[in-house]
Amino acid sequence: MIEPRHPLPPFNHETATQKVQAAENAWNTKDAEKVSLAYTIDTEWRNRTEFLKGREEVKAFLTKKWEKEIDYKLRKELWAFSENKIGVRFEYEWRDTEGQWYRSYGNEMWEFDANGYMEKRFASINDLEIGDEERRLF
């Protein structure tokens, strides 16, 4: 039996906001194992130009991501929701191994199963080089 991951669909404004905040909190841990547990075993992702299938691919992707994106800090905002779908606007800041800072921003579309696990995540992301003095997220 699969343990439900609350809040569960159908979403209302309060529960959709809770789901977005839980995702922000989890991603800011930069713990690929922990984050991957929010997704179904057979989750489908599009992240920029990468297409992932399954929790294990997500975990490997996130591990690699956070090795590259140092001092990662993320903010997510609820944009829209329906019964089992949530749209999110986000931005995050990070620096590369040479010390260049970036702000990455975009939108995500999420779809959940009845137990509250994310089945699909489609992300469109843009990166902007920024100076240290332009940072907003600490």
Image (cartoon, rainbow, N blue to C red):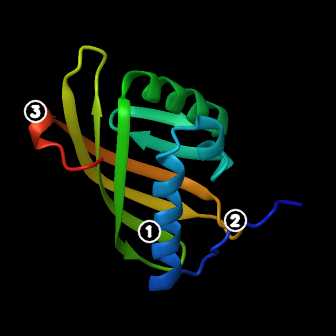
Q: Position of residue 46 (x, y in %)?
A: 42, 42
Contact between marks 1 and 2 (CB within 8 A): the answer is: no
Say which residue label 1 marks.
Answer: 86
Type of amino acid at the residue the image marks with label 3: Gly
Quarter in which the N terminus is drawn:
bottom right
Q: Position of residue 44 (x, y in %)?
A: 55, 45
Q: Which mark is residue 131?
A: 3
Element on which disc 1 rests:
strand
Residue 15 vs residue 44, the one in the foreground: 15
Q: Residue at x 62, y 43 (%)?
A: 36
30 in relation to 74, above or below: above
In this rendering, the label closer to the viewer, 3 or 1: 3
Give the spatial CA distance, label 3 vs label 2: 39 Å
Element on which disc 2 rests:
loop
Say which residue label 2 marks.
Answer: 5
Give the spatial CA distance, label 1 vs label 2: 15 Å
67 in relation to 117, above or below: above
Q: Position of residue 50 (x, y in %)?
A: 41, 31
22 on left or right of 39: left
> Which label's residue is closer to the chain start, 1 or 2?
2
Type of amino acid at the residue the image marks with label 2: Arg
Q: Residue at x 10, y 38 (%)?
A: 133
Q: Residue at x 10, y 32 (%)?
A: 131
Give the spatial CA distance, label 3 vs label 1: 32 Å
> Which label's residue is closer to the chain start, 3 or 2?
2
